Image (cartoon, rainbow, N blue to C red):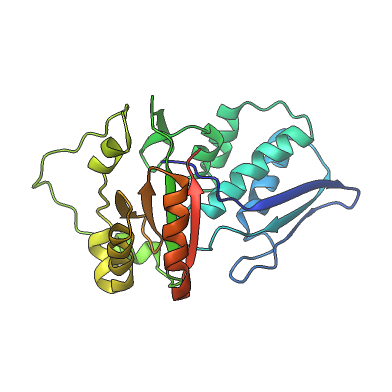
Amino acid sequence: MQRIDLCDDIVVAVSPEPGIRVSCGSVGVPNGPENIAWRAADALLRHSGVQTGLDIGITKHIPVAAGLGGGSSDGASVLMGVNELLGLGISDRQLMEIGVKLGADVPFFIFKRTAIAEGIGEVLTAVEHVPPAWLVIVNPRVHVSTAWVYQNLQLTNLRPQDRIPRFYKDIGDLVAVFANDLESVTIPRYPVIGEIKKRLLATGCRGALMSGSGPTVFGICDQEAVARKIAGQLSGDGWFVEAVQTL
């Protein structure tokens, strides 16, 4: 699991009015208790026993339901932000234990390092070295149900067990381990994902892969100029396209 510099903007403020209020205004994102940011703030206040009002404003830049962990990163950011804002002194480990109850990917964003994720995603091991890279993120703006993808995934034991290295010398080493079993389900149903992968490779990316259960695809590049050029070439198709840097 790898962080990138594409992020939402979140403002958290203490309010004299009791309760938690979340405002987003983005289509497909709830404002009330169904929002993971609301649930994160509520969980932390309950854990700490602090009684205060909180106003949370979210400006979305990460596409919704895109396989990019946008909701999970928002929840993690609220946990860390409220902890700092109220001076609660809760450790990252404790925040991760609270966060995993909100979503399997939440602990990763509190972990703040590139990691191998096991279990449901909550067992994290830091990767010792990953070369910096630029990515071209492409989302075709189609909705993919994560539940549907996993329900239709056929896992077998017919191949040798994969081993993920914890040290990568260069981008070539990263591309060598590119694989996503979920592509076998998602691409046949949404062929545009396969088309995007081919376009990214044809325009100069070193490798391309679907992110999570999709529909977002990323291509990896050595240089910022290359990534931005490719992003420009793909931006006219009505897709969400962004050149981003790994963190």
**Is 129 placed above or below 195 here?**
above
Q: Is residue 149 left or right of residue 103?
A: left
Residue 126 in which image quadrant = top left
Residue 65's x, y, as percent?
49, 63
Please state if 139 lies on the left or on the right of 157 as rendered. right
Q: Residue at x 63, y 53 (%)?
A: 8
Q: How many marks?
A: 0
Residue 156 in sight from this viewpoint: yes
Q: Give coordinates of residue 91: x percent, y percent.
A: 63, 26
Residue 216 located left or right of residue 74: left
Q: Nearer the viewer, residue 132 or 119?
A: 132
Q: Farthest residue to the right: give it.
A: 16
Say above or below: 235 vs 115.
below
Residue at image x 42%, y 44%?
Answer: 223
Residue 133 location (% of width, % of height): 42, 41
x 25%, y 49%: residue: 179
